[in-house]
Image (tube, grey):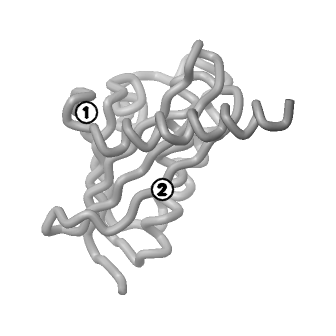
């Protein structure tokens, strides 16, 4: 089933910043019905790297769902303002991730990025913590 318009909440986090990191994506249809969630342990990264990687994963999933219009909600004001072009990108390490977001964004008719407080991003935040916990547990099993 394709969805023309999606509402997507993303989050990324690192324990230690940098440290063990995870990303979470919650995808809702235009009627605000949850249609998909995704989480991933991404290894050792910073909070901002994780935030960008969450947006990248969300764009990839939205493309598969056939979306044309996306309303993003993130609890990282820095990333929102960078993606809107309101803040310059000063961190050289984040530039490739920002460029990847812009490349993936070309597939869509419209994308809006909005900031929400963490309390309004609970589903994606929970997915991040689950991903980090699972990733840490899997690493610990190896040792």
| The image quarter in which residue 142 lies | top right
Q: Earlier in the sequence, mark 2 or mark 1?
A: 2
| The image quarter in which residue 35 lies | bottom left
x then y, percent, for residue 81: 35, 29
Residue drawn at (35%, 83%), measured in percent from left and top? Answer: 2
Quick one: which residue is furthest to the top in this view?
Answer: 16
x then y, percent, for residue 30: 18, 68
Whole-number angstrom distance, CA of label 2 to CA of label 1:
20 Å
Q: Are marks 2 and 1 in contact (CB under 8 Å)?
A: no
Name the quarter where the C terminus is drawn.
top right
Is disc 1 placed on a helix, strand or loop?
Answer: strand
When the figure is inspected, residue 93 is found, relative to residue 122, above or below; the finding is above
| The image quarter in which residue 1 lies | bottom left
Is disc 2 placed on a helix, strand or loop?
Answer: strand
Quick one: which residue is furthest to the left in this view?
Answer: 31
Local packing at callout 1 (Cα closer than 10 Å; few below 14, some 14-19, many 20+) is some
The numbered dot on residue 124 is none
Query: Is 11 placed left or right of 100 in the picture?
Result: left
Residue drawn at (13%, 68%), measured in percent from left and top? Answer: 31
Is label 2 or label 1 in front? Answer: 2
26 or 80, which lies in front?
26
Query: Is 45 placed left or right of 71 in the picture?
Result: right
Q: Which residue is mark 2?
A: 38
The numbered dot on residue 115 is 1
89 or 22, which lies in front?
22
When the figure is inspected, residue 69 is found, relative to residue 55, above or below; the finding is below
Quick one: which residue is furthest to the bottom in this view?
Answer: 1
């Amino acid at each position: 089933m394709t969805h023309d318009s999606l509402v997507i909440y993303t989050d990324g986090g690192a324990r230690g910043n940098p440290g063990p990191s995870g990303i979470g994506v919650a995808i809702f249809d235009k009627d605000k019905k949850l249609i998909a969630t995704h989480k991933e342990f991404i290894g050792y990264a910073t909070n901002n790297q994780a935030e960008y990687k969450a947006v990248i994963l969300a764009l990839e999933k939205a493309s598969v769902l056939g979306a044309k219009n996306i309303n993003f909600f993130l609890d990282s004001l820095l990333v929102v303002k960078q993606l809107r072009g309101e803040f310059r990108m000063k961190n050289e390490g984040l530039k490739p991730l920002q460029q990847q977001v812009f490349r993936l964004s070309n597939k869509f008719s419209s994308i809006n990025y909005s900031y929400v407080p963490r309390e309004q991003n609970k589903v994606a935040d929970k997915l991040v913590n689950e991903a980090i916990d699972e990733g840490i547990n899997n690493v610990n099993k190896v040792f």
